[in-house]
Amino acid sequence: MTSNLVPTYAPPNLVFTRGEGVYLYDADDKPWLDFIAGIAVNSLGHCHPALVDALKSQADNLWHLSNMFEVPAREQLARRYCDSTFADLVFFTNSGTEAVEGLLKAARKYHADNNQPERIEVLTFAGAFHGRTYGAINAGGNPAYLKGFGPAMSGFVQLPFGDEKAFLEAISDKTAAVLIEPVQGEGGVRAADDEFLQLLRAKCDETGALLLYDEVQCGAGRTGKLFAHQWSNAEPDGMAVAKGVGGGFPLGAFLLTQQVGEHMVVGTHGSTYGGNPLAMAVGIALWDELERPGMMDHVVKVGNFLKQQLAALADEYSDLVVETRGKGLLVGLKLHEKLIAKEVAGLARDEGLLIGAAGDNVIRMAPPLIITEDHAREALQKLGKALQKARDTASK
Ligand SMILES: *Cc1c(COP(=O)(O)O)cnc(C)c1O
């Protein structure tokens, strides 16, 4: 049968009909251990009762108003985000790419209003992924995502990830902002050093540039802090969030300091759906769970366990694995060039384990935050089998 979908995706021949906790099920009720979680989205697993309840009761009440009218839950969720971060002001979106666009606009507006309209340059880092809209693909700088879509936007300068020297040479009085993922997801599960983020903060303070974080993938508790940069104490002026904050319901936001956000006055930005009652109800229920005492400790503990197990596996398969990567429950294995990450993810799928591939030939795991050590053991045992198969094939 021919497909009526734009052919941007190539999913495997596999249909899930149900999800519960850390497992997905197909029509034959065969379980699949989900260690990619909609790419770091289903942070509480599938069909978490608190989220199901929140969505169902909101659905009986009120779905949509637009931003023409107040939604008290919007104010509530914004307050919750601000209480636990650097931020004073929040704008709700439906996705990560919209959140990044908002950050970029807010940064330029801030400088324009401060009589420095020439200050438009945004420094970004190789391997970055910031989404698929025009501003975001230009910020991401991945040639594969830009090719064929017309002239590159001016004002984006890309630097090697973590390269202090290149950064110190690039930042200038033209720099509007520095945009970085504290842990790169798509680019190969690479965590920036705390010292690097601290250097970015110090230099931004010195030059008047804004520091912007894209925590769409590494935020929402994924690294064992509510936001990944909180390990470093290098706080930003703006931050994009999405994915895990909605737990599977489309929800994103950009968070700003008062100083930056106050320039985004009436008429400067908007969204029809952003901050709708359904998203707010789910977002609040999800945040309640993330802030539950012990939740972040759990992520740290089970994340450490998973990483130890991955390191052991990397040792066992040192002919195939170059290194372990990541932080908390955003982890990966960089593979030797004789293997292709996507193919190894396919072999894992044959074993009933769902994982992803990322750039730089890395297999990526971003399981729900609620996994136990038993889930981690099960995943690693399946991944071991997949690597064994890859080894057998490679040696043929
Ligand atoms: C996924 C992702 C985005 C884009 O989010 P969408 O919801 O797909 O638009 C942006 N930045 C990072 C770091 C991401 O991982």
Image (cartoon, helix red, strand yellow):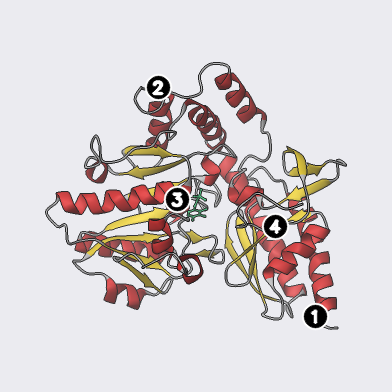
Residue under the point 53% across and 16% down: 61
Q: Which of 88 and 241 is in front in this view?
A: 241
CA separation, marks 1 and 2? 58 Å
CA separation, marks 1 and 4? 21 Å
Q: In the picture provided, is 228 more to the left or to the right than 367?
A: left
- For the question of whether residue 357 can be seen, the reply is yes
Under circle 1, the secondary element is: helix
Amino acid type, residue under disc 1 in the picture: Ala
Give the vertical position of 307 relative to 39 (above or below): below
Q: Residue 72 carries which label?
A: 2
Q: Where is residue 273 in the image (x, y as percent from the top left)?
A: 44, 33
Residue under the point 61% across and 30% down: 51
CA separation, marks 3 and 4? 23 Å
Q: In the picture provided, is 182 more to the left or to the right than 360?
A: left
In primary-sequence order, the first of circles 4 and 2 is 2
Amino acid type, residue under disc 3 in the picture: Thr
Dot 4 beta carbon under 8 Å from ligand 1: no
Mark 1–mark 2 CB contact (< 8 Å): no
Q: Nearer the viewer, residue 303 or 211?
A: 211
Q: Which mark is residue 97?
A: 3
Under circle 2, the secondary element is: helix
Dot 3 beta carbon under 8 Å from ligand 1: yes
Q: Nearer the viewer, mark 1 or mark 3?
A: 3
Q: Residue 394 carries which label?
A: 1
Q: In which image quadrant can residue 298 be found?
A: top right
CA separation, marks 3 and 2? 25 Å
In primary-sequence order, the first of circles 3 and 2 is 2
Q: Residue beneath label 4, please?
A: 355
